[in-house]
Image: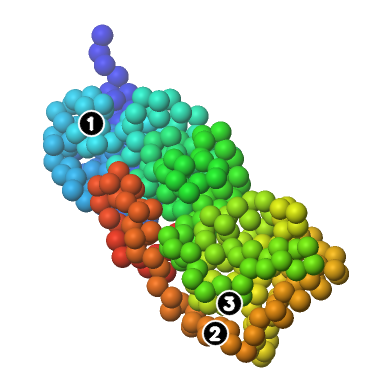
């Protein structure tokens, strides 16, 4: 039976049109590289339809990737799985549209469990896809596969809640187990709870590296009992943390303030029970110590009689002899031994010391977390 001379050209034309439409979907700044590679061979061009991520990865390779072995396999007609393996590309990327690819694709998780999980959390929106892919890759590098699958899910659930600037902190926190952590990461957490827990962890780190392992040597004032109230110094990290837990307040945030000699913290107790937290500092232009805060549990107001007892306690001291010389903000060094003890497990696990987490403590690095 004679072949229809119109069918083959018609199919070829339709495929050519489909291929062109697919190539047009790649981001404008990478289209030139993608098209140049696609023109080398029809089988390479077909990747735009069968595996857009793989065509992009071979056209815009990541550092250290030699595309030649994978391209040879494409031209030889080997399976996509074999080509993808040669390029280090997970097969689950097949489902992402061309719009997703903006930067060279780094190494991504590809464990069996991850492949099953990620299939349920792929972005449907081409607009969301580029940021989704980058964030999943970043969290995988910072933390581990379970965290990457978790952030992929949360990005689909609540994309507006994800702040890329906080991902480094979340990645570090989720990979640290329970070191200095009150609430550890679990894959069942929602992003809001995770952000709050990660920020609490960062506050604890800041407290530790600001104060170091030694207690504050000069508390300005002395412990005493006045009118049945005990005034006890909060001079160590453990004392501050215990007070913060018991009194439900924000004392852990005072590491920066304390190390710059701006205030001192005290616990007020009666019959052995905590009744208030007190902060001593300078007030306005007054160079002498003042009681600037006196709060009960949960920052509730305290009775007038406690204020009077606190004033009496303060005035037991010769206030003119107390040295409250303040340090300029940012001038107090972080504790090197504490900094290295905190981050050493991460450096060892990742087998590198990233520039953003240096071996020498840095306030810039701490603030950037």
Please indicate, yes or no, whether residue 46 appears anywhere in the rendered image. yes
Are the residues tagged 3 and 1 within 8 Å (C-beta)?
no
Q: Earlier in the sequence, mark 3 or mark 1?
A: 1
In space, the residues marked 3 and 1 are separated at their CA atoms by 66 Å
Return the residue at label 3: 220
Q: CA distance from mark 2 to mark 3?
A: 7 Å
Q: CA distance from mark 1 to mark 2?
A: 67 Å
**Residue at the image point whose x is 55% and y is 43% from the top:** 183
Element type at mark 2:
loop
Q: Could you tell me which residue is drawn at 49 percent across and 37 percent down?
A: 150
- Residue 110: which disc? none
The vertical placement of 158 against 237, above or below, is: above
Pinpoint residue 57: horizontal percent, then vertical percent. 27, 43
The mark that comes first in sequence, 2 or 3, is 3
Instruction: Name the element at disc 1.
Output: helix
In which quadrant is the N terminus drawn?
A: top left
- Front label number (1 vs 2): 2
Answer left or right for 47 relative to 74: right
Instruction: Name the residue tied to disc 2.
Output: 323
Q: Residues within 10 Å of mark 1 (few under 14, many from 20)?
A: few
Q: Would you call the spot at circle 3 few (<14 residues within 10 Å), some (14-19), or many (20 or more)?
A: some
Task: In the rendered view, tell whether residue 67 sits above or below residue 187.
Answer: below
Kind of element beneath mark 3: loop
> How far across and how far down the image is residue 51, in percent?
33, 34
Residue 172 point in image, percent of width and height: 42, 49
Q: Nearer the viewer, residue 57 or 267?
A: 267
Residue at 32 percent across and 51 percent down: it is 344
Q: Which residue is mark 1?
A: 85
The spot of residue 354 in percent (x, y) is 30, 57
Disc with the residue nearer the chain's start (1 vs 2) = 1
Q: Are marks 2 and 3 in contact (CB under 8 Å)?
A: yes
């Amino acid at each position: 039976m004679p072949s229809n001379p119109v069918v083959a050209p018609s199919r070829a034309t339709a495929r050519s049109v489909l291929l062109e439409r697919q190539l047009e979907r790649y981001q404008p700044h990478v289209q030139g590289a993608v098209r140049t590679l696609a023109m080398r061979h029809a089988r390479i061009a077909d990747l735009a339809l069968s595996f857009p991520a793989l065509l992009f990865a071979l056209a815009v390779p990541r550092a250290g990737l030699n595309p030649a072995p994978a391209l040879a396999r494409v031209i030889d007609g080997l399976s996509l799985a074999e080509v993808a393996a040669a390029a280090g590309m997970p097969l689950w990327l097949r489902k992402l549209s061309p719009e997703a690819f903006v930067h060279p694709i780094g190494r991504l998780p590809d464990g069996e469990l991850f492949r099953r999980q990620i299939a349920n959390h792929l972005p449907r929106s081409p607009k969301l896809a580029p940021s989704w892919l980058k964030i999943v890759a970043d969290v995988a590098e910072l933390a581990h596969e379970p965290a990457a699958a978790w952030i992929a899910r949360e990005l689909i659930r609540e994309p507006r809640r994800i702040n890329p600037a906080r991902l480094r902190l979340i990645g570090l926190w989720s990979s640290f187990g329970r070191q200095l952590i009150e609430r550890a990461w679990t894959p069942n957490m929602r992003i809001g709870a995770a952000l709050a827990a990660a920020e609490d962890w960062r506050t604890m780190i800041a407290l530790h590296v600001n104060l170091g392992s030694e207690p504050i040597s000069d508390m300005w004032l002395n412990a005493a009992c006045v009118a049945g109230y005990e005034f006890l110094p909060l001079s160590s990290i453990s004392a501050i943390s215990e007070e913060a837990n018991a009194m439900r307040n924000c004392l852990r945030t005072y590491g920066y303030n304390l190390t710059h000699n701006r205030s001192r913290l005290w616990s007020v107790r009666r019959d052995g029970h905590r009744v208030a937290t007190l902060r001593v500092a300078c007030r306005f232009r007054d160079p002498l110590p003042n009681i600037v805060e006196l709060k009960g549990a949960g920052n509730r107001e305290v009775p007038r009689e406690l204020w009077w007892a606190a004033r009496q306690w303060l005035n037991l001291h010769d206030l003119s002899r107390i040295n409250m010389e303040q340090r300029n903000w940012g001038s107090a060094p972080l504790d090197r031994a504490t900094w290295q003890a905190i981050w050493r497990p991460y450096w060892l696990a990742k087998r590198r010391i990233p520039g953003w987490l240096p071996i020498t403590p840095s306030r810039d690095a701490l603030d950037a977390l």
